[in-house]
Image: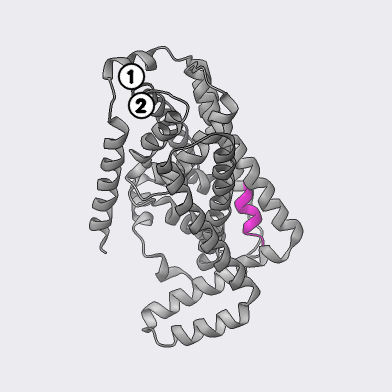
C-alpha cells in the first residue's frame, strides 16, 4: 500500500471515529460545559503531559543499554521531537523520526534503536491490558468496550509470546531467519537483517533482572502519570464522578482507542475513546465531547511546545523533520 493510500485510510478511520463521538451532541450544551472549566487545572494537564515525555526518555535510556550508553540531552530532545511528529505528521511519523534522529546523533545502529521502539510498544501494550482489566473489575463496561479489550488482550498475548520465544530460542530464530532472508532479494534482506539482529540485541534487556525491573517500574510510573493527567482534566470540568475509578477507565479506554491507526494527533479516536469511557459513568455526549476537545488541545499544545523547543535546541527545521519522516529507514538500518 503506497503512502498516499495509507494516509487516506487513516483519515477515513478518524472521520468514522469522530462521527461516533459527535452522535447525540448538543453544541450549545457542549460549549456551555467547556466555558465553565477551571483553567488552572489545565496547567497541571500540560505540565503532566510534558513530564510523561521525560519519563519516556528515561525508560528508553534503559532499553538502549545493550546498544550503548546515551547522553541525556539527545534522548530528551529526540523524544520530544518524535512525539510532536506524531501529533502533526501523518502515519505516526514520530515512530520513525525518533529512532532515526537518535541514531544520527549517537551513531548507534539504527536497526537496534528501531527494535527498542518495538519493545516500548510491547511494555505499553501490556500496561494498558493491565489497566483495562483492572477497569473492568472496578466498573461495568459495555459489550462494545469489552470487545475492544479482547482485541487488545489478543494483541498483547501475541506480542508477548513472540518476544519471549524469540529471546528463549534466539539461535533457532536466527537460523530460521537466515533461511528466510536467504530467499529474499538483497535490497530487502540486508536492511531486514540489520533490524532482526538489532532486535535480538535489544532483547538482552530481558536477561538482566535489574534492568528488566527498571523498565517495568518506569512503565508503571509513566502510566500512573498519564492517569493523573486525565484525572486533572476531570477535575477541571468539576464532574461529580468517582475520580480515581473514572481516571483509570478513561486512561485504559482512550489508550485502546488511540492505538488504532488514525489521522495526525489521534483526532477522532481520542474523542471517541473519551466518549466511551465517560458514558460508563453516565456523562452525556455533549459534555463528553467538550471534555475530550479541551483535554486533547491541552495535551497537543504541551507536546507541540516541548517538540518545538527541542527542534530549536537541536537546530532542526520542520522541513528537515518531514524529510526524516518520509525516509526509508531500511536503507540506513546498519
The answer to whether residue 98 is magenta is no
> Which mark identifies residue 256?
none
Residue 205 in view of the camera: yes
Which residue is located at x 66 percent, y 60 percent? 65
Is residue 41 placed above or below 96 in the rendered structure?
Answer: above
Work out which quarter of the rendered image holds the N terminus and state it: bottom left
Which stretch appears magenta?
58-65
Q: Position of residue 76 (x, y in %)?
A: 57, 45
Assess whether mark 1 and mark 2 are in contact (beta carbons under 8 angstroms): yes
Q: Is residue 20 above or below residue 239?
A: below
Q: Secondary structure at mark 1?
A: helix
Q: To which residue does mark 1 refer? A: 30
| 149 up-or-down from 197: above or below | above
- Of label 2 and label 1, which has the lower sequence position? 1
Residue at 42% x, 29% y is 279
Give the prevailing secondary structure in the magenta stretch.
helix
Label 1 CA crowd tier, 10 Å (few <14, some 14–19, many 20+): some
- Viewer-closest of 138 and 332: 138
Q: Disc 2 designates what residue?
A: 289
- Which scheme is used to colour this image of the protein? one colour
Residue at 53% of width from left, 52% of height from top? 125
| Position in image of residue 24 (x %, y %) | 28, 26
Judge by depth and name the residue closer to the eye, 98 or 289: 289
Name the element at disc 2: helix
Amino acid at each position: 500500500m503506497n503512502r498516499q493510500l495509507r494516509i487516506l485510510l487513516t483519515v477515513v478511520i478518524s472521520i468514522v471515529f469522530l462521527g461516533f463521538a459527535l452522535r447525540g451532541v448538543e453544541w450549545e450544551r457542549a460549549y456551555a460545559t467547556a466555558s465553565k472549566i477551571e483553567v488552572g487545572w489545565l496547567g497541571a494537564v500540560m505540565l503532566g503531559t510534558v513530564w510523561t515525555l521525560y519519563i519516556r526518555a528515561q525508560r528508553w535510556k534503559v532499553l538502549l543499554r545493550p546498544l550503548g550508553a546515551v547522553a541525556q540531552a539527545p534522548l530528551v530532545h529526540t523524544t520530544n521531537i518524535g512525539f510532536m511528529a506524531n501529533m502533526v505528521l501523518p502515519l505516526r511519523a514520530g515512530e520513525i523520526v525518533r529512532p532515526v534522529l537518535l541514531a544520527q546523533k549517537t551513531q548507534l545502529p539504527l536497526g537496534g534503536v528501531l527494535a527498542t521502539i518495538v519493545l516500548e510498544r510491547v511494555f505499553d501494550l501490556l500496561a494498558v491490558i493491565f489497566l483495562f482489566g483492572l477497569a473492568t473489575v472496578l466498573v461495568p463496561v459495555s459489550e462494545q468496550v469489552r470487545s475492544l479489550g479482547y482485541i487488545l488482550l489478543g494483541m498483547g498475548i501475541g506480542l508477548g509470546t513472540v518476544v519471549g520465544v524469540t529471546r528463549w530460542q534466539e539461535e533457532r530464530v536466527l537460523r530460521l531467519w537466515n533461511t528466510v532472508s536467504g530467499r529474499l532479494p538483497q535490497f530487502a534482506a540486508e536492511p531486514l537483517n540489520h533490524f532482526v539482529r538489532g532486535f535480538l540485541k535489544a532483547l538482552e534487556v530481558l536477561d538482566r533482572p535489574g534492568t528488566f525491573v527498571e523498565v517495568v517500574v518506569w512503565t508503571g510510573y509513566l502510566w500512573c502519570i498519564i492517569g493523573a493527567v486525565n484525572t486533572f482534566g476531570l477535575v477541571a470540568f468539576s464532574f461529580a464522578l468517582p475520580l480515581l475509578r473514572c481516571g483509570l477507565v478513561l486512561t485504559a479506554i482512550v489508550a485502546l482507542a488511540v492505538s488504532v491507526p488514525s489521522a495526525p494527533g489521534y483526532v477522532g479516536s481520542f474523542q471517541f475513546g473519551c466518549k466511551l469511557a465517560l458514558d460508563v459513568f453516565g456523562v452525556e455526549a455533549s459534555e463528553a465531547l467538550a471534555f475530550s476537545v479541551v483535554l486533547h488541545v491541552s495535551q497537543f499544545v504541551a507536546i507541540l511546545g516541548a517538540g518545538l523547543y527541542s527542534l530549536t535546541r537541536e537546530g532542526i527545521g520542520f522541513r528537515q523533520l518531514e524529510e526524516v519522516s518520509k525516509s526509508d529507514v531500511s536503507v540506513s538500518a546498519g
